[in-house]
């Protein structure tokens, strides 16, 4: 019987890091009896959007049509173990999960869910919205919205509960995301324990790191989104930010601005929600890889007062980016559609 390991994220929990390693070590996976079912690096993303009816993208994605069926046929045609990883699957509704499970029958499903500290993931999630131009929202407004709904996109316990309709607890693996000081290889080791992989010799590609923005960089991109909203469609804005701006910001040297922190005024609801998630994961009887105590707010995450961004700071960051000498001419934004 085919065993399918579905790594479903959610976003901002190390998925890009793991997916890059899986793609670059496809031959090693095959030697171990595992199939990576994609023919190009973006195919699992397209397939995941296809099976979800493109519910979580804000633009037409015609290239996703039929992608899930193509991946699914490869999966079910393989007699061993398969690893399929896409963090957007963490957003799947119960109806999407029903569709996924039915399409992969009679394969035996294993689900891998990442759990990260809520206090630590909130700044990352807001930055991701800014990078994806989805839709423009300030840091205080974003926190207010998440406080009101309990930040469901980052809730591993919710994802576990939804998949339990189709997968027994013994085949649901929850990996706690270790603090940055522990190093990314610890996350890889936990992923290997959940999937049975031998990752000896696997090393991350430094160029594939999905680095966080500082507060000034995030605000610079947010204002760029506002300035271009009337002259570019959303897809063109997204490519301008991610193809042109972000690679040069990352290559500009040490950040000028402060790290984005969570206002101490948010501590109460985050502590209560964290306690609820830990209790729910413990009660779920899913297999835990790591330590649920890592979901507690990490040291140094709280800001005791406002974190203002000055126009002078934004100008300095913008000038630093403009001063970089690109290796090739910048793409014409009119070609980004």
Image: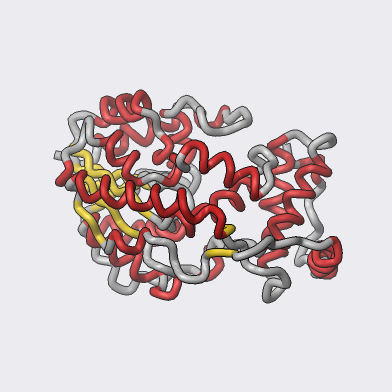
* Towards the viewer: 209 or 27: 209
Q: Is residue 285 left or right of residue 208?
A: left
Identify the residue shown where x is 33% and y is 47%: 276
| Residue in the foreground of this view, choosing between 5 and 288 | 288
- Quick check: can you spot residue 80? no
Q: Quadrant of the C terminus?
A: top right
In front: 292, or 106?
Answer: 292
Q: Is residue 151 left or right of residue 143?
A: left
Marker count (numbered)? 0
Q: Indicate the colouring scheme.
A: secondary structure
Q: Position of residue 141 (x, y in %)?
A: 64, 43
Residue 290 to residue 270: above or below = below
How far from the left and from the top, in percent, is residue 200? 28, 72
Apparent side of residue 285 relative to residue 88 in the rendered image (left or right)? left
Q: Quadrant of residue 288?
A: bottom left
> Where does the image place residue 171, in percent across and percent down from the top left?
18, 45
Q: Quadrant of residue 303?
A: bottom right
Residue 109 appearing in the image: yes
Q: In which quadrant of the rendered image does the N terminus lie?
A: top left
Q: Quadrant of residue 22?
A: bottom left
Q: Is residue 260 left or right of residue 286?
A: right
* Residue found 64% across the figure and 48% down from its top: 140
Which x, y percent locates residue 101? 27, 30
């Amino acid at each position: 019987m085919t065993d399918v390991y579905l790594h479903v994220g959610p976003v901002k929990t190390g998925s890009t890091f793991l997916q890059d390693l899986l793609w670059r070590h496809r031959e090693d996976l095959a030697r171990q009896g595992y199939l990576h079912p994609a023919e190009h690096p973006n195919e699992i993303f397209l397939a995941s959007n296809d099976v979800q009816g493109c519910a979580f993208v804000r633009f037409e994605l015609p290239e996703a049509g039929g992608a899930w069926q193509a991946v699914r046929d490869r999966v079910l045609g393989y007699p061993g173990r398969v690893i399929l990883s896409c963090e957007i699957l963490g957003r799947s509704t119960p109806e999407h999960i029903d569709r996924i499970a039915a399409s992969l029958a009679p394969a035996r499903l294993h689900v891998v869910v990442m759990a990260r500290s809520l206090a630590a993931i909130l700044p990352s999630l807001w930055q991701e919205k800014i990078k994806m131009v989805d839709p423009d929202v300030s840091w205080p407004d974003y926190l207010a919205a998440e406080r009101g709904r309990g930040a469901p996109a980052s809730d591993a316990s919710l994802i576990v509960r939804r998949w339990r309709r189709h997968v027994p607890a013994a085949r649901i693996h929850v990996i706690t995301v270790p603090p940055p000081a522990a190093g990314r290889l610890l996350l890889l080791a936990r992923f290997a324990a959940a999937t049975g992989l031998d990752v000896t010799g696997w090393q991350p590609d430094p160029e594939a790191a999905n680095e966080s923005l500082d507060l000034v960089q995030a605000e610079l991109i947010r204002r760029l989104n506002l300035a271009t909203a009337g002259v570019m469609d959303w897809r063109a804005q997204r490519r301008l930010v991610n193809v042109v701006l972000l690679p040069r910001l990352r290559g500009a040297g040490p950040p000028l601005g402060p790290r984005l922190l969570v206002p101490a005024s948010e501590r109460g609801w985050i502590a209560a929600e964290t306690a609820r998630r830990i209790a729910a994961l413990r009660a779920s009887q899913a297999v835990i890889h790591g330590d649920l105590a890592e979901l507690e707010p990490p040291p140094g995450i709280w800001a005791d007062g406002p974190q203002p961004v000055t126009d002078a700071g934004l100008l300095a960051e913008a000038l630093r980016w403009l001063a970089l000498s690109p290796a090739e001419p910048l793409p014409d934004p009119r070609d980004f559609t």
